[in-house]
Image (tube, rainbow, N blue to C red):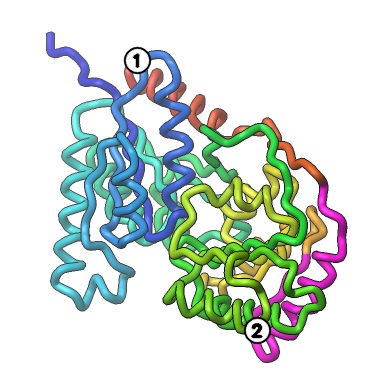
Amino acid sequence: MTPVRRTLVLFCGGGSGGHLTPGLAVADALSAGDDPPEILFLVGDRPVERRMMEAESYLHQSFPLAPVRRTLTSIAAARGFAGAVRSARRAAKGRPTVAVGTGGYVSVPGVLGAKMGGAVVFLIEPNAVDGRAKRALSPWADRVFRATPNRKRGLPAEVRVEPRSLLVLGGSSGSASLDAAVPAAVAGLSGVGSLRIRHQCGGDPEAVRSAYVAAGVPAEQVEVASFFPNAAVRLAESAAAITRAGALTLAEAAGYGVRPILVPYPHAAGHQLANARRHAAVQGCAVVEEGPNLPERLRAALAESLAEAPPAVRRLTPIDPAANVAELIRAELRRLRG
């Protein structure tokens, strides 16, 4: 009698940190349980994916993947798509497998290949509006989770808030428009010399840092970097924040009770604006859309935010969607094993 191969959970997604972190959170929860499955991540090869996966112990395979239009016109992207389909199909074939699509165009070939290999398909959709990849994959999905699994491993239960501090997050790859608009907004604030700035940028960190210094913020009170690995903690520590409206950022903000000023990314298929409006309706935070006079509108929102006395301490809520999703995956694997 041929033994059943070890169960597999194949996470397919990437292109941004917001498409990888939910899968990593669920993988953490699966690994912490009894009889953990084999875990494999199928990702793209953009810098953010390489940086994040190189820091993990999980097995992963990366491919030169791209949106549909480029896949149809680029030989490298077409080969990457075909290679990802073959790899996922080969990994899933002949054993109990759950393929988890976590979002982004990177999820498409992996989910399709795994389905061809006999896998059960789960999709995670944390956004208020489904992305293009999720809409394309929904006919093959056995279940869709409307949740935002987020990593709480290593996050402190409580964080002290630094008065007169501002965090700027333009997403995992930064934001050129916020790099320009926020220093200009800060320049007109009263008490600018007492601000402490932390800014995750999309361009040249030194150029952004110089813009803050020119706006009147002392150089020793400005920290600019291309990536902050502990963004959730920095968000909790900051008296005020300006961020995009990706679902992961909003989950981190809600976890610590932070009310950031949200500037939805205008080219994200409309879902960031929907995310921002949904979040603002619950949390009461400001939403500033990109467009004319962005620095002036940010200045007004920021002045109001800084005028509010922040709490001395922010505490992390115990809600853990990752554990719930992991338990449902375990149940499906048990069913598949018979």
Q: Residues within 10 Å of mark 1 (few under 14, many from 20)?
A: few
Residue 284 is left or right of residue 295, and the answer is: right
Q: Is residue 208 above or below residue 76?
A: below
Amino acid under label 1?
A: Gly
Task: Examine the image and state in which quarter residue 7 appears.
Answer: top left
* Residue nearest the viewer, comparing 300 with 281: 300
Magenta stretch in the rendered image: 286-311
Residue 142 is left or right of residue 99, and the answer is: right
Q: Which residue is mark 1?
A: 338
Asked if residue 73 lies in the magenta stretch, the reply is no
Give the residue at x 21% y 78%.
73
Q: Are marks 1 and 2 in contact (CB under 8 Å)?
A: no
Q: Secondary structure at mark 2?
A: helix
Which residue reaches farthest right?
Answer: 308
* Residue nearest the viewer, comparing 230 with 129: 230
Q: Which residue is mark 2?
A: 184
Residue 108 placement (x, y as % from top left): 33, 56
